[in-house]
Amino acid sequence: MRESREKFLGSFAGLSEEQGRVPPAPDCWSVLDTVEHLTAAETLMLKLITTQRRPRSADATNREQVFLQVVADRSRKMQAPESGRPRGRFATLAEAAEQFKATRDGVIQFVEQHPEDLRTSEVTHPHPAAGTVSTHEMVIIIAKHAERHAKQIEEIRIRLGIGN
């Protein structure tokens, strides 16, 4: 969790507010849009694991390896659900980054406060491609989702000619 947090925050470190608002193409997200999306998605996923967990059947399919391999893979394009799409939630990149940090701190705190096997509970992921996942799988998705969007921000910076 901490590693993917730092990787994500590092992906847009040093960008000006102006640079953060520029999309690389008309149909693409800006860095601010990407940070907003990740923050909104992670906020929702944290809410789900803290308020919607339910017991998981012992014979439920374990998809941890699939999520570890697929979620951060940018060669597979995904459409964000409506609830996670950018819509101007944050006035600045700094504000979005602060909210991301607060949310990620909440995820880390949740994991630290729940030493039990998180494979024994489940939640319904907001993205239909994931469906019902164990709480442990959701934690994996949260970490890998940040890595995915750190890569997306690196792609945006390259397309805009903005070095790290």
Image (spheres, grey):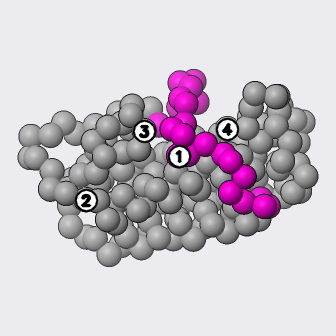
Amino acid on which the number 3 mark rests in the picture: His
Disc on the earlier residue, 1 or 4: 1
List the residue tagged with mark 2: 53
Q: Is residue 89 magenta?
A: yes
Disc ID at residue 94 = none
Q: Is residue 86 magenta?
A: yes
Q: Amino acid at mark 4?
A: Gln
Residue on which the image places disc 1: 83
Q: Which mark is residue 127?
A: 3
Bounds of the magenta segment = 71-93
At x 37%, y 70%, the residue is: 110
Q: In percent of the image, x 31 and y 46: which residue is there?
A: 124
CA–CA distance between discs 2 and 4? 30 Å
Question: SS at mark 2?
Answer: loop
- Asked if disc 3 and disc 4 are in contact, CB closer than 8 Å, the reply is no
Q: Residue at x 53, y 29 (%)?
A: 78
N-terminal of the two: label 2 or label 1? Answer: 2
